[in-house]
Image (cartoon, rainbow, N blue to C red):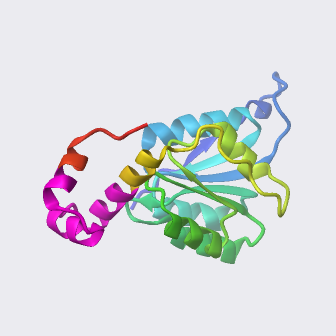
Amino acid sequence: MMLMIETVSSPSDSPETSGPPSLGTLLLADDDNSFRQRLAVTLGRRGFDVRAASSAAECRELMRQIKPVYAVLDLRLGDGNGLDLVSELRGLHPDTRVVILTGYGNLATAVAAVKEGAIDYLAKPADPEDLITALLAAEGEKPQPPAEPMSADRVRWEHIQRVYELCDRNVSETARRLKMHRRTLQRILAKRSPR
């Protein structure tokens, strides 16, 4: 099995440029290629030495090779769960500051992420500035609320999508668990996500 592990150097790695000061190694795991690459470049420009992985297997390999100061982990990877990676990473490197990213924001998962050792939990697509603020926050400092939090309609839609995915996209089972009429659920699923 061939692992493809990306390394994104910050501009400060080049002797001809004077970029931001190095903030340390950051482990980034996300299976969305374009999002991962954009985020890696942005964080690299801000001074992080980014090591990126597209799967849980690649992330585990990187955990054994480097000692990251920071980690940004997607909750749902194609071959694993970000929460499992948090506990494994904290076991290997207890001082690593971990932030969980997910497209499926819900309170139960946020609580589980924090219990596993994550310092924050952000919904995708996360603003890079919010992510950097969470990573660099002083120990015990509460992060600022987001400038543009998700609307109540968006939170509801995200929750419905999450349950739908957990039910293997079975509309009847999802409707039963959400205690809603099947046709109502079908109408919600047919609409685009609210802002």
Q: Is residue 59 left or right of residue 11?
A: left
**What residue is rendered at 64% in x and 38% in y?**
128
- Relative image position of residue 26 (x, y in whole percent): 69, 51
**What residue is rendered at 27% in x and 61% in y?**
164
182 magenta-colored: yes
Front one among 38 and 144: 144
Q: Is residue 187 left or right of residue 18?
A: left
- Relative image position of residue 62 (x, y in whole percent): 60, 60
**What residue is rendered at 45% in x and 58% in y?**
55
For residue 9, say whether it is visible: no
**What residue is rendered at 47% in x and 63% in y?**
56
- Relative image position of residue 147 (x, y in whole percent): 65, 38
For residue 64, say whether it is visible: yes
- Relative image position of residue 67 (x, y in whole percent): 73, 62
43 magenta-colored: no
Q: Is residue 183 above or below residue 6?
A: below
Can you say which quadrant of the picture contains the N terminus? bottom left
**Magenta span: chief secondary structure:** helix
For residue 68, which quarter of the picture?
bottom right
Q: Is residue 48 left or right of residue 29?
A: right
Q: Is residue 89 above or below residue 148?
A: below
Residue found at the very far bottom of the displayed protein: 91
Can you say which quadrant of the picture contains the C terminus? top left
Front one among 146 and 26: 146
Segment colored magenta: 159-186
Q: Is residue 2 above or below residue 89?
A: above
Residue found at the very far top of the displayed protein: 16
